[in-house]
Image (cartoon, rainbow, N blue to C red):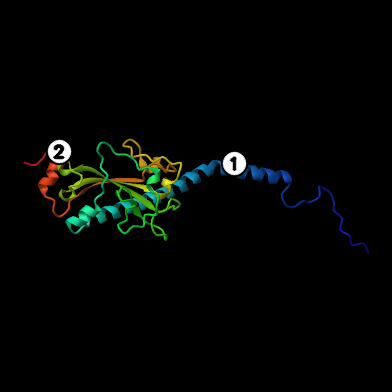
Amino acid sequence: MNNQFQFKGGSPPTSGYTILEGLMAVVVVSVMLLAIGPVIAFSVGTRVQAKRVELATQAARSYIDWVKAASDDNTVTERTPKQSAIPAITAPATGDLTGDCTSKDGYCTTDKKLYCVNLDETPGCQTNSPVDMVVQPIITQVTDNDVANSNKGYQMQVGVYRANSFVAGVTLQPATKSDSLTTNAVGNRSLPLVVIKTEVLPSGATFDNLKERLNGTPSP
């Protein structure tokens, strides 16, 4: 008795994908990736930049609180930045961050142009760190037009740059009024992430000192 199965009629059955179907699937997936890839990249970049801005804001606030927490005139003088906006506000130079900024007072140089806010496990600020922030404090307005007389109070601008912006080949730029630092600084390490202005009023400062500074005229 012959039990061999015999196929009757029609084309033989097939299973799985053909080569043509596989190629079509690859083409469809490639087109989809090309369509949504830039959107995904922009979304990720925006989230990363938002995190950087958050860290930079924390760094600026930490420095401002540290300066304002000075308990006496000597401490006020020690913590007051020496760089002023007279005649104009300038960006720091790439070579200003030469060391690791591990001094006790947090300043990177003796002229107090830069202040380190360490946000990783390595002490100080390094140019290869993706999270360390470098603060550039600048006195923008003073009482009696005397930058050294910090005990009467002063107005200060705090700009925060990424520590890895100080590598060779990057030309740092000051903050611009017309541009949005949050959006235009995406991928642009030459711009500060955050710029904050504040009034520093030591315990020895008076209301007349503040009034004089805001009006730009000396007190009688």
- At label 2, the amino acid type is Gly
Residue that carries the numbered disc 1 in the rendered image: 31
- Nearer the N terminus, badge 1 or badge 2? 1
Residue that carries the numbered disc 2 in the rendered image: 216
Location of residue 81 in the rendering, given as x and y in whole percent from the top left corner: 26, 49
Q: Taking 47 as reference, is 70 left or right?
A: left
- At label 1, the amino acid type is Val
Q: Taking 72 as reference, is 19 left or right?
A: right
Q: Nearer the viewer, residue 128 or 197?
A: 128
In the rendered image, which quarter contains the N terminus?
A: bottom right
Q: Which residue is farthest front? A: 110
Residue at x-position 36% and y-position 44%: 192
Q: Nearer the viewer, residue 10 or 92?
A: 92
Location of residue 110 in the rendering, given as x and y in whole percent from the top left corner: 31, 51
Q: Secondary structure at mark 1?
A: helix
Residue at x-position 11% and y-position 50%: 206
Q: Secondary structure at mark 2?
A: loop
Location of residue 19 in the rendering, given as x and y in whole percent from the top left corner: 73, 45
